[in-house]
Amino acid sequence: MVHTLGGVLISWIAIVLFEKYKISRIEMILLYGIFGPLLISIGWEIFEFVSGITFLSSQYSLDTTLDMSMGVLGGIIGSTLSVYFFKNFLSDASHV
């Protein structure tokens, strides 16, 4: 659950940065909204390995796979909601 919410948050941050810099291609927003959380998840797993946290779990590979999958799922959810929000609400507000 935490990794999914983290993925959503990271995705939203990426989308807000795209909006700030006027990048409007939906494919790019979705791409970075999904790969952003994936890269953060990879970094987190490297941190866990280097700091020795991984040796506490006998099923580290399953934990790593689930953590990264949930981060990407959160990125997909966050990107999809962000694209929907920006397309339907911000585009209407700019014409007012």
Image: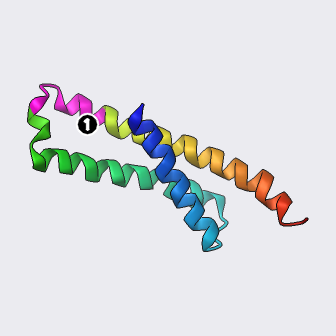
Secondary structure that dominates the magenta span: helix
Membership of 28 in magenta stretch: no
Question: What segment carries the magenta color?
Answer: 56-65
Q: Is residue 90 left or right of residue 18?
A: right
Asked if residue 57 lies left or right of residue 66, the reply is left
Q: Could you tell me residue 47's position as x and y percent?
A: 19, 50
**Which picture quadrant has residue 91?**
bottom right
Residue 10, can we see it? Answer: yes
Q: Who's the residue at 13% across and 37% down the image?
A: 54
Residue at 35% from the left image edge and 54% from the top image edge: 39
Residue at image position (55%, 53%) is 12
Q: In the structure shown, which secondary structural element does the residue marked by tag 1 occupy?
A: helix
Q: Is residue 73 above or below residue 20?
A: above
The image shows residue 11 at horizontal and vertical percentages of: 51, 52
What coloring was used for the rendering? Answer: rainbow
Q: Taking the image as drawn, is residue 31 in sight?
A: no
Q: Quadrant of the N terminus?
A: top left
> Is 58 one of the magenta-colored residues?
yes
The crowding category of the residue bearing disc 1, from other C-alpha atoms within 10 Å (few below 14, some 14 to 19, many at least 20), is some
Q: Residue at x 47, y 39 (%)?
A: 5
Q: Is residue 52 left or right of residue 5?
A: left
Residue tagged by mark 1? 64
Q: Looking at this view, is 96 or 59 the one in front?
A: 96
Quadrant location, the C terminus = bottom right
The x, y position of residue 71, in whole percent, is: 41, 41
Q: Nearer the viewer, residue 58 or 51?
A: 51
Residue 81 picture location, percent across and down: 64, 44
The amino acid on which the numbered mark 1 sits, given as a three-letter code, is Thr
Taking the view exactly as shown, the residue that stands out farthest to the top is: 58
Q: How many marks?
A: 1
